[in-house]
Amino acid sequence: MVEDKATEETMVDEEKEISSEPLKATTHFVLVHGISHGAWCWYKIRCLMESSGFKVSCVDLKSAGLDQSDANSVLSFDDYNKPLLDLLSALPENEKVILVGHSAGGLNVTQATLKFPKKILLAVYVAATMLKLGFSSDQDFKDGVPDLSEFGDVYELGFGLGSDKPPTSAIVKKEFQRKISYQLSPQEDSTLAAMLLRPGPLLAITSARFAEDSIVDKVPRVYFRTLHDHVINPGQQEAMVKRWPPSEVYVLDSDHSPMFSTPFLLFGFLVKAAASFGGLK
């Protein structure tokens, strides 16, 4: 486990040292958002990466960000994850990427690893749902689905299949968003999120199930734990790490959204993880 209690200022100095190394654009990070977010949520990390010479792709999954689909019409995980799979499919034959997933985006990373293992140099899970088989058991739901009951009635639900059917979409109500996901983040970032968050395709995400396949274990994985996380809480993160141990665990003193609350620390750990697995070229 790698744990760093350094201040942001210390990490800035470290990042200057890291970013001074000659990097080629062939070091390619692909960043995947969680439910209700979009590619926009990576704006700080993308800026840091591109300023340091990395190639970066940020994906809008189906019904997220700039994608115009209605979340209530996205009913399968394959459909939801199609933009990421299309991006990986279109990569040059010999190009490998460092695939980073935040929150529920961990499920998208796992499916992509199953489908394109030869195109992924390293899979990174940031406060993410890391379940080898997706939601295939009661334990998977216990470990991977946020329990926000302590905050009260926090969700606005959509019922695209009818009020007598399970909900097809969900979004956290505006009055709860900061205290749940961004309590340690700058106020301007939680304000930005409140303006841009969209309902996520709940039914599609919770229907994610993956077949048992040893090929997924051939791609190195690392996990970034977030110590003050109200969404995927520390106990859930620890349980997923124990059930499907990654190669390395990094610890961030952050809320659920380290791309906002601790961007320099997150960037530094991403570069460090990439270097550890031969991702800096």
Image (cartoon, helix red, strand yellow):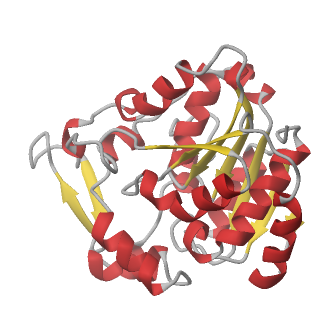
Q: Is residue 136 left or right of residue 190?
A: right
Q: Is residue 139 visible?
A: yes
| Quadrant holding the C terminus | top right
| The residue positioned farthest toward the top in the image shown | 93
Q: Is residue 281 left or right of residue 43?
A: right
Residue displayed at 84% across by 81% down: 10
Foreground of the two, 106 or 46: 46
Q: Whole-percent x and y of residue 97? A: 69, 33
Q: Whole-percent x and y of residue 230? A: 53, 74
Instruction: Determine which quarter of the picture holds residue 27.
Output: top right
- Tell me if residue 74 comes above or below residue 20 in the rendering: above
| Quadrant holding the N terminus | bottom right
Foreground of the two, 67 or 154: 67
Foreground of the two, 33 or 164: 33
Residue displayed at 25% across by 50% down: 169
Q: Is residue 92 left or right of residue 81?
A: right
Q: Is residue 94 left or right of residue 155?
A: right
Q: Is residue 7 visible?
A: no
Q: Whole-percent x and y of residue 22? A: 86, 47
- Tell me if residue 198 comes above or below residue 116 in the rendering: below
Instruction: Determine which quarter of the picture holds residue 107.
Output: top right
Residue displayed at 83% across by 68% down: 16
Q: Whole-percent x and y of residue 40? A: 43, 57
Instruction: Determine which quarter of the picture holds residue 252.
Output: bottom right
- Tell me if residue 140 comes above or below residue 177 in the rendering: above
How many marks do you count on the picture? 0
Residue displayed at 40% across by 43% down: 60
